[in-house]
Image: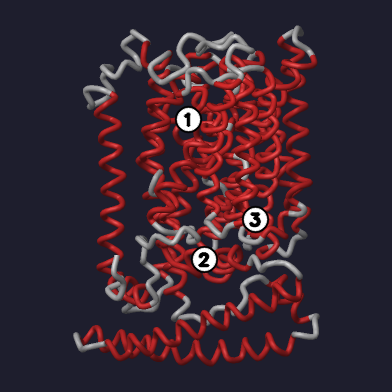
Amino acid sequence: MRPDRDGGSLGGEGASDDSVEGSGRERVGPFPSWGWVYGTLIVYGVLMLGVLTVLTWVLDPGTTP
Amino acid sequence: MTHLDWGLFALYFVGVVSFALYQSRRNVGVEGYFLANRRMPWWAIGLSVMATQASAITFIGTTGQAFDNGMSFIQFYLALPFAMVILCAVFVPFFYRARVFTAYEYLEGRFDAKTRALAGFLFLVSRGMGAGIILYAPAIVLSVILGWDERVTILVMALVTVAYTMVGGITAVIWTDVVQMLMVFGGIAVALLALFANLPDGVGVGDVLYIGGIQEMWRSVDFSLDPTNTYTVWTGLLGGLFLFLAYFGTDQSQVQRYLAATSLKDSRLSLVFNGFLKVPMQILILSIGVLLFVFYHFEQPPLVFSPAEVSVVEASPRAGELRALQEEHVRVHAQRLEATQELLEERHRGADVEEWRAVIQGYDERLRELRSSAKGIVAEVRGRASNDVNYVFPTYIVQYIPMGLLGLLIAVIFAAAMSSLDSEITALSSATVMDFYRRWFRREASDAHYLMVARLATMFWGVFAFGVALYAGQLGSLIEAVNQIGSFFYGSLLGVFLLAFFVKPANGTGATVGLLAGMGSVFLVSVGTGISWLYYNVVGAVVVVVVGTLVSRLTRGGEGEPA
């Protein structure tokens, strides 16, 4: 089997699937689409970095983040 | 260890084996054994993904690292949420829809058999070694707690894990991982609460934060651009991103988990779940280490926590040097204790404590120097680096954790180790059977035959891990050792998959040459430069993609690949 024979790039098999699941339009729990899930996760990652930076600055006043 | 502790410890072993066997009763055939017939729910896979990564090394080594160096290790995990997004959007759909058993099987579909074989071989070598180190970590704990020979401990744990994994396959592994991961969450909470409870009366959360801050132990981010420093934001974001993409996207021990999901949606959700929980969990684990640092302001810590390392030096001509350091360590600790109490009194009165802060900082630094000198003596006498960092947390729980909770925490450390080991040996077994045995030696055989071979392969990798574990003590800080072993292969493997997903004209020859070039480059970078090992993954992946693309273009037509 050559699952990616007709579409080895990102625009191939993964993205060309027309089924609802995995198409990006699928509803995921409270999120309207996978794009929202990914966006939330990215914002969460940035927030984590921000929170740790602020905590470092507050708890270790001698350091300059 | 009291009878109650022993009882809890034994209950864990009996419970986990019984549960594993119960859950695996519906497993039929080799697809059931390796992929649970693709019927696992996302939350179980999500916990299993976490349990696989969070081994006893995480629990022991990370707390010890935080005790010595503070929270800076958290930067290693900062890229994880971003890696999960890329994995869910790109990697998972390719694997899931290909209906493969292993990640490397996909490479044969996309490239050719030799690329699959090389990638599978690299996985077997690197994770076989990693499984041994995972097995060794709890053996350290028991060597401290029970006075057992590490080899006996390694053997006992390997036997139990291999037994339930052999019988139950991935179903047993995932469901026991769920239980074991919940135990780890409980263990983290118990350890944090016990540490607070063991602090002297009148020392509050604010005081703990303040004392830790004196030595910058809470410092979680470092924005310096030094590429030789492993623990900076940039190293974590770039090197960590590539490491996590490689680990979760190309390592069969993780890919096998989300291939077992009921649907593509479940596969993705299991990784999203991990992306949200992993960083907070690591913050809590590292906090245990910093709390230990604060706790030992009020209690005399050992200069060297490992009794074995102390014994080795005491039996050497340098025993006198170590004794002198220990005496000074006790003296400086007493001075620091006095200064800490003065500081807290002043602080509670609302007075200016800057002077005391400077005094304590001086004592902290002197104690750190003494510990560093002692570790240097240990390393010179033993002829290899001290791994005392792994003994900090075990020593604390033995001396200060109350009856009952000690048995529970020991069971948690075992759970953490076994939940990683079982996943590794199942993954090693699946790659051995599907990528090598069935592909090269016996293409047509009954399902029962492959199932029997799968169980034998599981047993073989258990024995192999046992053998490696016997020598793992020579590898220094365990957590770095596991990641460093992976870094020599991971980046290059990631490069091959990136080539497969993104470079349409790439062919098998390009992928294989690129993979070898990537590993060669990582080797040269590791011996020729001082950059952090986290960047090895970036180097390996980039070289594979560049070389693989060039070679594919040069050999285009020869393999009939699409242009």
Look at label 1 and name its amino acid: Ile
Mark 3 or mark 2, earlier in chain: 2
Residues beneath discs 1 and 2 located on the same chain? yes
Label 2 sits on residue? B402
Q: Residue B116's spot in the image, x, y percent? A: 65, 23
Label at residue B289 = none
Label 3 sits on residue? B527
Q: In this rendering, is residue B150 above or below B216? A: above
- Is there a contact, CB below 8 Å, between mark 1 and mark 2? no
- The front one of B311 and B185 is B311
Look at label 2 and name its amino acid: Pro
Which quadrant holds the N terminus of chain B?
bottom right
Residue at 56% of width from left, 87% of height from top? B329
- The front one of B417 and B282 is B282
Q: Mark 2, chain letter?
A: B
Q: How far, Cα to Cα, is label 3 from label 1?
A: 38 Å
